[in-house]
Image (tube, rainbow, N blue to C red):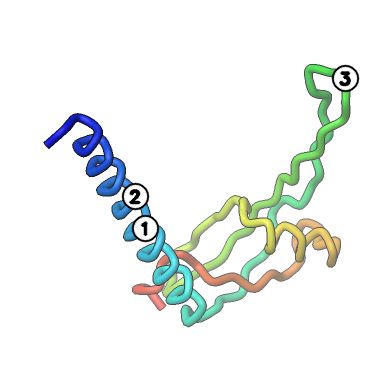
Amino acid sequence: MTFAQLIGMLFAALGAGVIVWSLWNLVQAFGSRKWETTEGVVLVSDLQRSRDSDGGVMYRPEISYRYTVQGHEFVALVFRPRLVAQLVRSRGPSGSAVSSRPDCPGLL
């Protein structure tokens, strides 16, 4: 076996690993669509403004909400673009209701 063949096999194995990992994430993502939803309350809904190194303006959403599942209270920070867009569109201020699919399906 030549060195080039060994390198080729290494890259093929790494590529196969990435494909398997990606498919597993896809299966998990589709499975989460079946999770039950729960209602929560927006704690913070704000758009932070800052300057970058070139002097340009950058915006960063700061959104968090609280929800309860089977008597356990959770606070979530929003990093999901779809939920950020939904909250910004609805202008959900602090104290407004929000629907969530908590990342703890075993509790529902």
Tell me where residue 37 appears, x and y as whole percent: 55, 78
Q: Quadrant of the N terminus?
A: top left
Tell me where residue 9 appears, x and y as whole percent: 23, 44
Farthest-out residue, front = 2
Q: Amino acid at mark 1?
A: Ile
**Label 3, label 2: how many angstroms apart (C-alpha)?**
40 Å
Q: Nearer the viewer, mark 1 or mark 3?
A: 1
Along the viewing direction, whichever of 67 and 15 lies nearer the viewer? 15
- Closer to the N terminus: mark 3 or mark 2? 2
What residue is drawn where x is 41% and y is 78%?
108
**Which residue is labeled 2 in the image?**
15
**Left or right position of 51 against 22:** right
**Which residue is labeled 1 in the image?**
19
Mark 1 is surrounded, within 10 Å at the Cα level, by few (under 14), some (14 to 19) or many (20 or more) other residues, namely few
**Which residue is labeled 3 in the image?**
55
Q: Amino acid at mark 2?
A: Gly
